[in-house]
């Protein structure tokens, strides 16, 4: 049976659940709002259509989210690349700056070091005889090992300190003039006077005397140490050097103030050219004495025993061979030998006492040049570790 409703009555009011099931919004009662009656549920949007529209709306929303995420990510990537590029550029600039300043620092340091060395060489006095140092401290510094030779040297230095009362030592420049340097320094620093024979003769005229009075033409072959100069001007050079020796010796022997002599010695022994000329003058004085004694031997006169030993050698049988084989090499390739030390002491009339440290505990530990000096001759002392290089002791 079909139920009919009057036309004037409003349509049926469906429950809200029915509208939600069909995908429609529940309509308000038309009588309450005064509007037309809603369409029946079967006339609204179907369930299948609603299901088709829902994924599209979700996809659209997801696309919007993805687009915003992509934009944000790209913005961050761009910002990071810019920041990274700026940091790389800054680091590169900083590294280049550091490298530049490091190079500048090294260059300036090198130039400063060069200038300091130049100024030191220019203005600092290069003393060939150094200042006094403590004897035992010098020994400890030079002989640190425990070898038999080192132990021997330590005992020798202790012997000098305790028994001979040598408290300090002066180091002497090690070259082939150091024996002459050591002797001349002590003569000048002590203010010793001329030898007696030099007071009787004008030593400045000795080169001419050898040539004209004794006919020693071979003197032209005299060699000035490393200079190796020979020729017609030998006499002029020798005369100039001997005159310089006489002037300096006279000046030092006339000084009574010990400290003033010390200051003058420091000035003199810091001038390499002046030193060299004085040492060559000493070599000539030795040659002159050898020539004088040789003439006495030819005249059958008594001569000192050391000269008999000298002339008995094949290499120094006469003054010429002595000069050519021994004296010309002094200052160049060798220093003074022991026989030369005898001649030096005899020529300068000084007693040269030498402590030969490597001969400790033997009779040759302490020797004198010459062996039998005259009593009135002044005494100077030297130390040697090998008979080649010398030190100056300070009592």
Image (cartoon, grey):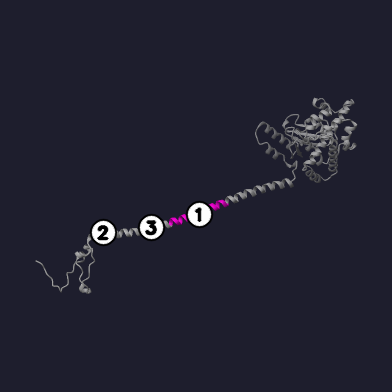
User: Is any part of residue 349 visible from this angle?
Assistant: no
Task: Say what secondary structure mark 2 lies in.
Answer: helix
Q: Are the two marked residues, 2 and 1, in contact with CB atoms closer than 8 angstroms?
A: no
Whole-angstrom CA distance, mark 1 to mark 3, is 26 Å
Q: Pick whichever, 167 or 89, lies toward us.
A: 89
Pointer 1 residue: 87
Question: Which corner quadrant of the image does residue 333 belong to?
Answer: top right
Pointer 3 residue: 69
The quadrant of the image that shows the N terminus is bottom left
Pointer 2 residue: 52
Q: Pick whichever, 93 or 306, lies toward us.
A: 93
> Where residue 41 is drawn, which disc sits there?
none
Q: Is residue 83 above or below residue 145?
A: below
Q: Earlier in the sequence, mark 1 or mark 3?
A: 3
User: Is any part of residue 60 visible from this angle?
Assistant: yes
Q: Is residue 315 above or below residue 129?
A: above
Q: Are the two marked residues, 1 and 3, in contact with CB atoms closer than 8 angstroms?
A: no
Magenta-colored span: 76-97
């Amino acid at each position: 049976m079909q139920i009919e409703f009057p036309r004037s009555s409003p349509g049926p009011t469906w429950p809200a659940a029915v509208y939600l099931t069909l995908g429609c919004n529940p309509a308000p009662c038309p009588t309450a709002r005064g509007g037309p009656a809603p369409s029946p549920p079967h006339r609204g949007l179907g369930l299948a259509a609603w299901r088709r529209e829902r994924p599209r709306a979700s996809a659209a929303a997801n696309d919007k989210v993805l687009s915003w995420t992509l934009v944000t990510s790209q913005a961050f990537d761009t910002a990071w690349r810019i920041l990274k590029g700026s940091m790389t550029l800054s680091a590169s600039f900083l590294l280049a700056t550091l490298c530049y300043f490091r190079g500048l620092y090294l260059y300036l340091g090198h130039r400063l070091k060069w200038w300091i060395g130049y100024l030191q060489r220019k203005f600092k006095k290069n003393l060939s005889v150094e200042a006094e140092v403590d004897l035992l401290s010098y020994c400890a510094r030079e002989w640190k090992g425990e070898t038999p030779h080192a132990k021997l040297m330590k005992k020798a230095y202790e012997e000098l300190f305790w028994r001979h009362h040598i408290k300090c030592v002066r180091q002497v420049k090690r070259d082939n003039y150091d024996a002459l340097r050591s002797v001349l320094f002590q003569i000048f620093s002590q203010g010793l006077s001329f030898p007696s024979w030099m007071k009787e003769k004008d030593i400045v005229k000795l080169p001419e005397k050898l040539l004209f009075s004794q006919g020693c033409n071979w003197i032209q072959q005299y060699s000035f140490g490393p200079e190796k100069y020979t020729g017609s001007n030998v006499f002029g050079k020798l005369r100039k050097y001997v005159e310089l020796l006489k002037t300096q010796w006279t000046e030092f022997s006339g000084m009574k103030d010990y400290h003033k002599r010390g200051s003058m010695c420091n000035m003199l022994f810091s001038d390499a050219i002046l030193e060299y000329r004085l040492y060559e003058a000493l070599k000539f004085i030795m040659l002159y004495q050898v020539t004088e004694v040789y003439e006495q031997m030819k005249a059958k006169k008594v001569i000192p025993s050391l000269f008999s030993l000298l002339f008995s050698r094949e290499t120094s049988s006469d003054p010429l061979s002595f000069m050519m084989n021994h004296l010309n090499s002094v200052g160049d390739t060798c220093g003074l030998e022991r026989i030369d030390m005898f001649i030096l002491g005899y020529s300068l009339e000084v007693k040269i006492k030498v402590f030969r440290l490597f001969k400790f505990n033997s009779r040759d530990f302490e020797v004198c040049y010459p062996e039998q000096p005259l009593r009135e001759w002044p005494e100077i002392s030297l130390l040697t570790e090998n008979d080649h290089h010398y030190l100056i002791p300070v009592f």
